[in-house]
Image: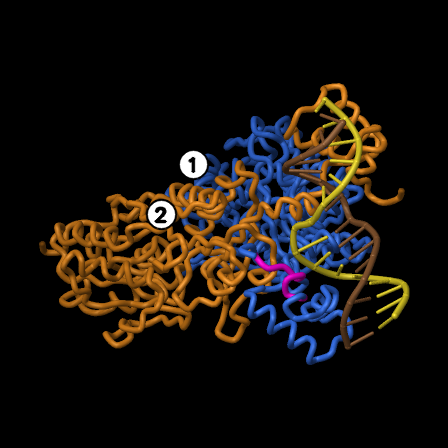
Chain colours: A blue, B orange, C brown, D yellow
Amino acid sequence: MSHRPTLADVASAAGVSVSTASLAFSGAGPIADATRRRVLDAAAGLGYSGPNPLGRQLRSGRSGIVGVVVGDALRRSFRDPVSVQLLDGLVDTIGPLGLGVLLIPGPTGPDEPAVDPLVEAAAMDVAVMLWGGTLDDPTLGALRRRGIPAVVVEGQDLPGVVTVGIDDRGGIAAATRHLRELGHERIATVTLPFGPERRSAVADADRIGQITWTLSRRRLDGLAEAGVTPVAVYETPASLVEHGTAAAHALLSGPAENRPTAVVAQSDLLASGVVLGARELGLRVPEDVSVAGFDGLDLPWLAPDVLTTVVQPIADKGTAVGRAIQALLAGDTPADAVLPVELRIGTTTGRAPGA
Amino acid sequence: MSHRPTLADVASAAGVSVSTASLAFSGAGPIADATRRRVLDAAAGLGYSGPNPLGRQLRSGRSGIVGVVVGDALRRSFRDPVSVQLLDGLVDTIGPLGLGVLLIPGPTGPDEPAVDPLVEAAAMDVAVMLWGGTLDDPTLGALRRRGIPAVVVEGQDLPGVVTVGIDDRGGIAAATRHLRELGHERIATVTLPFGPERRSAVADADRIGQITWTLSRRRLDGLAEAGVTPVAVYETPASLVEHGTAAAHALLSGPAENRPTAVVAQSDLLASGVVLGARELGLRVPEDVSVAGFDGLDLPWLAPDVLTTVVQPIADKGTAVGRAIQALLAGDTPADAVLPVELRIGTTTGRAPGA
DNA sequence: TTGAAAGCGCTAACAG
DNA sequence: CTGTTAGCGCTTTCAA
């Protein structure tokens, strides 16, 4: 027997039946202490390290795997701290449930295959889509075909899948109201990508109508909820500091008379880029321009400044996803969750100049 | 048949045998076009979405899963960009091989269980340990017991496992030589954690002798290789900007006469924190103090400055790990890899003051 | 408390 | 080119 020992080998070495040996490992049934010890000893002697998960999985029909489809914010070097933190939290949450996270790349470009092979063929009990999911999403289609239940995070509210999200609109509305109370009248906004085609430019009304990623849409709508029509909407290709800086240069280079006095960015990374860009232009934050963000990240490079931002409960999001997964595995239909956010006022917003 | 259809159902619906139906999906054998179509049609009619991976896995003895044990640099909110980028690259590299990445939390604290249950029980064909692995590592022990081959990244060179790393020592030595050529005599260094017990303080000789994480040790040794004895060694609890800032305050607060004129940090995040901290102290970089890092990250918040740093080939590292995995799965014993690094001179190093 | 037997869904010889 | 047969390693009735 040069091969790796199986439960049958252990059983025969211990002089018991396979079913008894199984019990010795699983503990799922009555077994005499002496017998168990005998089995375990035999296992140790043979170098048997426990039941082969493959056999167990086939038998139970469960893989113990949660497939996590990471949106392209993660794909690009996992540079989105929110997704990364959520992923981390998710790993922690489902670990105790005996589940593991399988990373699945989301769709990247228009040229690549729409669905990763893992979505089609990997063993998983549930799938989580991080920041994604439109109605016609081929990934969602493939999962449905396979009968794998899905949890969508920060996506569209779709029929047949569980959604976990936050109050994007209300959060931006709160930040916007804060700025209005400070006397700001000319407020610009810097957004996350509108869709898979990514641009770095001021968007006109036409272009704004083309937003397909509902996250960006919801956050944009927050301004309207607060009664503000932004003087400019700057669309970025990704939530990165440098794109915020580029936005600042585009939005804040003009003369003071019609320059925005405040900028609401849809992410903290973008917002911190706006702050840095404003400073490069010789503007003081918040004396000349106020900047607010969204996420609630630690941004040590702005120190001693603290960004005014909408803090989202990333840990709670992970917990909510974990709960949804657990419910789905139990055969229940968990309710969608919309978690509250909170405005944290830092040092990057202040009274409008001249107000 | 309210249950999910199996290959047997499809076969009988198509009027063929199971093995023929299997061939229709796998393409691993001769099959008549018409037959295949018939099978596929039957499958479509039944809503069969392809062979159940669990059955296939048990049969083939392969799970198609690469377990990636993420060191605690990743665990803490995945905040180490290098590990995150490597993980991303790894996903890309092994995807085409039909493999998926299972995330496995590494050991966290001294109180927690030393080995994650997934290491003991999850199905995987190979394991990768990201930045970890000491001789007595319980994770490595569990893997060996299970007969799962392992690739260790940035760890110790252990017998029986494949190691992929970079020329840490040579990289730091190159950066140090660069500083010496600029006339620097008093060079301090800011290190990664020494071991699981994390401190934020200047380390004395005694403490330096206690370094258990060989990565930090190798990088520290780079200074000696360049013939430099650092005037101070500052040990940080994690590779984060704020700890670099703290180090700067500790190292650079004194009078100019015996203040270090250059700081070599073992990571870019630390280095950028040192730059920010130096500026907070009213020091100009590089006029008053030069700063060099390690990694080669994009640091947009230092713009327009560019950090002088040792660039490590993260993508190549991912490729090397992928190759090692492939070899291990083929039953070969791949060679250890030590990848070269390259000094990139930016704007944060300059002539020593008065030199 | 233990054992015998069935079968999870699939693939790979092998025979036809 | 297609069908028959035999497991992969395990858990779980059900009987003893």
Position of residue B77 measured from the top left corner of the image (x, y, whole percent): 52, 58
Q: Residues within 10 Å of mark 2 (few under 14, many from 20)?
A: few
Q: Residues within 10 Å of mark 1 (few under 14, many from 20)?
A: some
Answer above or below: position of B36 versus B324.
above
Q: Which mark is residue B335?
A: 2
What residue do we see at 62% from left, 72% from top? A40
Identify the residue position indicated by label 1 in the image.
Answer: A253
Q: Chain of mark 2?
A: B
Residue type, numbered disc 2: Ala
Position of residue D5 measured from the top left corner of the image (x, y, whole percent): 76, 41
In this orientation, which residue lies closer to the viewer: A165 or A183? A165
Q: Is residue A266 left or right of residue A33?
A: left
What residue do we see at 63% from left, 30% from top? B28
Span colored in magenta: A4-11
Q: Is residue A5 magenta?
A: yes
Discs 2 and 1 lie in a common subunit: no
Q: CA distance from mark 2 to mark 1?
A: 56 Å
